[in-house]
Amino acid sequence: MNWNAFLVGMLPEHFLLAGLVLLIVHAIALPSGRGMAALALVVVAAAAASALVLGLTGFQGEAFPGQLGVDPTVSLGRAVALALALPVLLLARDDLGDGGPLYALLVSSLYGLTLMLGSNSFLTLFLGLEMMSLPVYVLVLLGVRRTPSAEAALKYVILGGAATATLLMGLALLYGSQGRLALDIFARALAGNDVMAQTGAILVLLAFFLKGAIVPFHTWAPDAYEGASVAVTGYMAAIVKAGVVLAALRLFGSTVSQGVIAQLLVLLPLASIAWGNLAAMRQPNLRRMMAYSSIAHAGYLYLAFLGAPAGRFQAVLFYLIAYGVMTLLAFAALPGHREDAERDRLETLQGLFHRSPYAAVVIGLAMLSLAGIPPLPGFVAKFLVFREVMAAGHTLAAVFGLVGSYLGIYFYLRVIQYMFMSPLAAASAAATAPRSRALLASALCLVPGFVVAVAPGWVLGAL
């Protein structure tokens, strides 16, 4: 064990683990749960800040040689994911209360995410992936105000189980051909001619496609998103997706995508972009619409894997910042409602500008950014992705991806039309104004969103 890397490089994990223990002790000592939200916020903020400092200072080391390490890319990825969790924690208090297992589950899921991003072996990668995923199944089930929450949790468990089985089968083939489980065997399998190794690498990639809800592996993902609470839906759409994509990116390392893997990275992401945007057009509520939107955005993210190793990490991380901030902003500004199932129906959002101008403007900004309208962050993020794809020689894929992105403009503008150009809906009588925590969560998203929009070059220089 490298003690310096363990004590310093794993500071985010130490903060999260200590916070998890404190949350459990707090729940035993004070069953009412008062103060758990503040404790979780402090813990996650400290973990995010430590990861950011480690990333900006260029700290590098292996706490457990061959198993777990840290470098600037790992630390920056951790910092982004943990920072995105802060608005979720604020929203969770309004949705699911202050007590119960909510905050312990969120922190334990984040702990698994940080382990996964720092893994140098498939053993620790698998451990981190499952530690991140298992608490989310319970978090979906906690959306007790929504009738389909139990069904949604079951479907999400089945999806997760299928991904786990696919990953393990791929790892078995990789281990059988390579004789070890270091992450670099994935890149070696891509570059070699061993059929067993290449089959294992493809299965591993398909497992990450399952986790990221890439078409045709997206089945039931929208049902899980719709059945969860608003905060948990935001967590799955932004943070879980960020963790899965960054972990997949770590597998590729400095390898250039080619052969069958490159074909998969062209066909399935393009199918996700097209189907996600087309299916979102007919959705009756914002939560389900955002689920299909996340399928389309997963397509953009995986399309960036075609780019050169030097630029794809920067493009992917910038995209995750822009997408995550704006997705959470839309959920944070969403007004409350006495009936949670009616809260995000498009009919309920009719005339929102007339009763809550701030919420309508903020959600409108989020929709325009997700659609890729300049000069908002989403435009710069998509530009970076398509630039990397074209620079790698996949011009036709970039053209099809760009055409597919135009499909998404319709349903994003449809939400704006409901909020600004429709009369006040009768269903909005039961709506309530955004609470103070939701307003703070939206501010936590607006500030970085503004920075990314105004100074994208400065952000890119820091990545």
Image: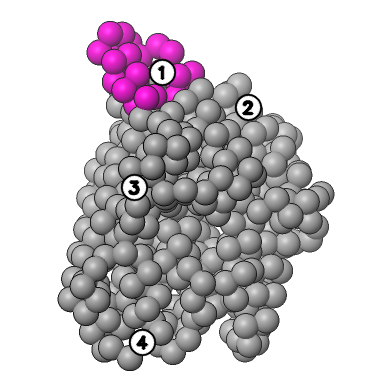
Classify 442 as above or below 136: above
Q: Where is residue 440 shown, x and y percent of the image?
A: 63, 27
Q: Please name the amino acid that badge 1 sits on.
A: Met
Q: Please, which colouring scheme is shown?
A: one colour
The residue located at (76%, 44%) in the rendering is 451
In front here: 277 or 245?
245
Magenta residues, dominant SS class: helix
Mark 3 or mark 2, earlier in chain: 3
Classify 426 as above or below 347: above
As for residue 34 lying within the magenta part, the answer is yes
| Disc 1 secondary structure class | helix
Mark 1 sits on what residue? 36
Label 1 – label 3 distance at C-alpha: 32 Å
The answer to whether marks 3 and 4 mark residues whose Cβ atoms lie closer than 8 Å is no
Label 3 – label 2 distance at C-alpha: 39 Å
Q: What segment is highlighted magenta in the picture?
A: 18-40
In front here: 436 or 38?
38
| Disc 2 secondary structure class | helix
Looking at the image, is mark 3 or mark 2 nearer the viewer?
Answer: 3
Mark 2 sits on what residue? 440
